[in-house]
Amino acid sequence: MNINNAEFIISAVGPQQYPDGQLPEFAFIGRSNVGKSSFINTLINRKNLARTSSHPGKTQTINYYLIENTFYFVDLPGYGFAKVSKTMRAKWGKFIEAYLSKRNQLQCVFHLIDIRHVPTHDDVLMFQWLQHLGIPTIIIATKLDKIPRGKRQQHIAQIKKALNIKEGLIIPFSSVSREGKDEVLALLDEMLG
């Protein structure tokens, strides 16, 4: 799959703002500053359709991107250490929960985890919750370019151990070197049939 056509559609904070219709949706979730926006921009070959920031908590709404007029990428707010009030974090939590548990168009969640670190308590809870909901989930181990080649398998093993993954997909990914991009696009192709 090559993505040539992508456009921002809406920033939603609840179901009444989600796009109408039955187009499949692929959601992206992860800690604040894990690289969700960079991941999306890499997949769609654009520098900044999804806005990136060095400040955690930049994405504060559910952002919809229409891809090739046939499906949506859905960028969810980051969880974890974002420098926002507890009230705002609780609000995000509610609309993320509503989206993940009730959106029929959702096909798969790409759960982004920084490959450099052992998954946090929040990462583990999110992964367990996605499993509980029965949502197909693919782990994207971001920031691959920041660790030496010889240590990659060790870092992937620690993600598997922390999340208790016996089988399942972990795709190491770098928005700098673009490693992992073709694998993700091939998976999307497969899921879209």
Image (spheres, rainbow, N blue to C red):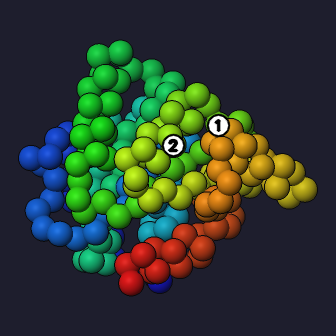
- Foreground residue, 172 or 104? 104
> What is the quadrant of the C terminus in the image?
bottom left
Residue 83, quarter of picture = top left
| Disc 1: which residue | 119
Rendering coords of residue 17 (x, y %)? 12, 48
The local secondary structure at tag 2 comes to helix
Q: Earlier in the sequence, mark 2 or mark 1?
A: 1
Q: Mark number for residue 111?
A: none
Question: Which of the 4 quarters of the picture holds residue 109?
Answer: bottom left
**What residue is shown at x 31% (from left), y 39% (from top)?**
96
At x 48%, y 56%, the residue is: 137
Taking depth in this image into account, of 144 and 138 the one nearest to the observer is 138
Rendered position, 126 above or below 22 = above
Residue type beneath disc 1? Pro
Give the Cα distance between marks 2 and 1: 10 Å
Residue at disc 1, secondary structure: loop
Location of residue 181 with respect to 89 vertically, above or below: below
Q: Nearer the viewer, mark 2 or mark 1?
A: 2
Q: Where on the picture, by quarter, is residue 121? A: top right
In the image, what residue type sits under mark 2? Phe
The answer to whether the residue labelled 2 contacts the one labelled 1, judged by CB atoms less than 8 Å apart, is yes
The answer, for residue 13, to whether it is visible in the render is yes
Q: Is residue 192 left or right of residue 45?
A: left
Name the residue: 37% across, 78% down: 192
Return the x and y of residue 90 as percentages of the image width and height. 31, 22
